[in-house]
Every structure is written in structure tokens, then in C-alpha cells.
Image (tube, rainbow, N blue to C red):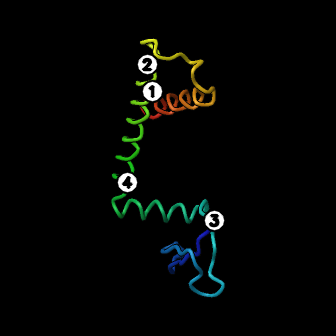
Amino acid sequence: MEYYVKRDGSNNVVALFKREQTPGQERLDETHPDVVAYLAIDIAENGKIDKINLLKAAIVDQFKFIIEIFEVGKAKGLWVNADFDPVLLQKGAEWKQLINDIEN
């Protein structure tokens, strides 16, 4: 995604727009360091970081729950790995690794 940017007198990005506000307005990709910096400041100033962290924790908990259901079912003989698509099994392994990376 690209944004049209508005800068202040110190050349800092102070606003992002989806549409051009003035002819010839500077346009930057969402990965441009100035755009990333602006978005990080905006998120922090609006208290969204706490909400994002809560959401991340909830997602990790959901993945843990799904993995636990799978493991319990396997332990009780309700299913075996061969019952599942290999792509799904790989995705589960990736989830477990991401959770381990986050928690350690």
C-alpha cells in the first residue's frame, strides 16, 4: 500500500492519506522508514499498543488451545497424524514454533 504524506517543517511525517491532498504530493510505500516511524508513533500515542498486545496474547492462547485439543485427541487414540493433511500438520508445527519463540 502507498500513502501520500504530509511533512512538517522538520521534514517529519505528520499525516498519511490514501488520496492525494495537493497536486504533486509525496507518495511513499508502507514499508518506507518514515511511514513505519509515523505509524509506530501514532499507535503508541493512541494507546493501541496495549490492545495489540492483548490481541497477540489472545491469539497465542487460541493456538495453544487448538494444539492441546489435537494432542489430547492423539493421546486418546481419537486420531493419528495420518488422519490430517500434511499441510495442516506443518502449519501446526509452525504454530508451536512461533509460540515457543514468543514465550522464550
- Residue type of the residue flagged with mark 2: Gly
Circle 1: element type: helix
Q: CA distance from mark 4 to mark 3?
A: 23 Å
Circle 3: element type: strand
Q: Which residue is mark 4?
A: 49
Circle 2: element type: helix
Of the two numbered discs 1 and 2 on the same chain, state the one appearing first in sequence: 1
Circle number at residue 29: 3
Q: Which residue is mark 2?
A: 73
- Residue type of the residue flagged with mark 1: Ile
- Residue type of the residue flagged with mark 3: Asp
Q: CA distance from mark 2 to mark 3?
A: 46 Å
- Residue type of the residue flagged with mark 4: Ile
Q: Which of label 1 and label 4 is nearer to you?
A: 1
Circle 4: element type: helix
Foreground: 37 or 65?
65
Identify which residue is drawn at 59% across, 71% down.
Answer: 3
Whether tag 2 and tag 4 are in contact, CB under 8 A, the answer is no
Q: For mark 1, does the 10 Å Cα neighbourhood hold few (<14), some (14 to 19), or many (20 or more) residues?
A: some
Q: Position of residue 103 (x, y in %)?
A: 42, 31
Circle number at residue 67: 1
Taking the image as shown, residue 37 lies to the left or right of residue 54, namely right
Seen in the picture, residue 48 relative to 69 is either above or below; the reply is below
Whether tag 4 and tag 3 are in contact, CB under 8 A, the answer is no
